Amino acid sequence: MTTISRGVGLAALAAIAFGVTTPLVAWAGAWVGPFATAALLYAGAAASSAVLRVARPSGSRLTRADLPRLVGVAVAGAAIAPALLAWGLQRTGATSGALLLNLEAVFTAALARLVFREPLGGRVATALGAISAGGIALVLAAASGGDWRVPGVLAIAGATLAWSVDNTLTRPLAERDPLAVVAAKGGIGATLSLAAVTVAGEHVPPLAPALVLLACGATGYGLSLRLYLTAQRRIGAARTGSVFALAPFVGAAVAIALGDRALDWLTGLAAALFALGVYLHASEHHEHEHAHAPVEHDHPHRHDDGHHDHVHEPPVAGEHSHVHRHGALVHRHEHAPDLHHDHH
């Protein structure tokens, strides 16, 4: 598999892990306030990541300089976004709410282009267009179903914007140990949301919905974010965000399977457009001659990727992280917008 196809696969798995939780969050959130929902989701994410960190880290350590960015990520993605999503889902059907999450891909791609100047190209732009068109088809299907409420729609749209800001802020953290990033984001986000619960005077949630939200947080927000960060490490923010647009379709499919509404031709059309978009991403081939300037940094790497030929004693196999130096290099090979290939 190429670097791009591996990154696309990881982003698709992240989308599935997140998408299947949206209808469950809609169900459990009916008994839980929006801030309590956000707190439980990210408490579950933080707890699962803390447990899994007994394994070998797959990235460099977080540093004190990362703290302001982590706080921004937690505020936007672990406090504001899930609270808006929970509030919106309470006022919009589970299927409609899941489908509206398509906006996140468009916002993320736009911010990645503006902030990081990530090159898209005609193929990626076509893929993003196909996925966006699939999202429009799904929204039209939801609007015709009668569960369209303007306040809920605006709240979920605000959640997607907050998550796209989160994705943009997270991009420079993709080289860090993803479990550490998830644990930090979840811990800070849950703490902020708990403070909001106290201010808003929300009631203590019933046990069953609370456990469901904790489980959703562990998988849809913990595991999913870990996969998302690893995908960003390989293919950049714009492509990861575009493939992650599969999540709304996954959520809608689960909601339909649970009886939220019937399957229709617009949903079938959306499925075809999503499949086209993912295929265009996975089959992308980007190769040209490019130059690397000398640099010293710390990030996850392998010794078979054409950039890391330093020697370890004893030898090290597989992905690992440590401070290392690169000399100047000019070469040609297939690559994606990762840490070593941010040329425009």
Image (cartoon, helix red, strand yellow):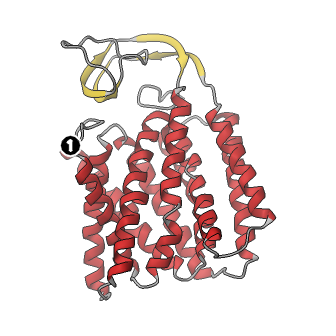
Asked if residue 282 lies left or right of residue 112, the reply is: right
Q: Quadrant of residue 187?
A: bottom left
Number of other residues with Cα within 10 Å of mark 1, as a class: few under 14, some 14 to 19, many 20 or more: few
Q: Secondary structure at mark 1?
A: loop
List x then y, in percent, for residue 260.
Answer: 64, 76
Image coordinates for residue 58, horizontal then vertical, percent: 30, 36
Furthest residue toward right = 265
Q: Which quarter of the picture shows residue 104?
A: bottom right
Above or below residue 159? Residue 184 is above
Q: Given the image, on which type of amino acid does mark 1 rest?
A: Thr
| 70 relative to 231, above or below | below
Q: Is residue 140 visible?
A: yes
> Looking at the picture, how far across and down is residue 294, in whole percent?
34, 16
Q: Position of residue 20 (x, y in %)?
A: 52, 61
212 sits to left or right of 112: left
Q: Is residue 85 at all visible to an observer of this figure?
A: no
Q: Which residue is mark 1?
A: 63
Query: Looking at this view, is 76 or 259 the one in front?
Result: 259
Image: 206 above or below 192? below
Residue drawn where x is 74% and y is 68% of the image: 263
Q: Nearer the viewer, residue 268 or 143?
A: 268
* Residue beneath the point at 36% across and 55% down: 222
Q: Considering the image in quadrants, where does the C terminus appear? A: top right
Picture quarter with the N terminus? top right
At x 51%, y 47%, the residue is: 13
Residue 171 is left or right of residue 112, and the answer is left
Q: Residue at x 72, y 48 (%)?
A: 130
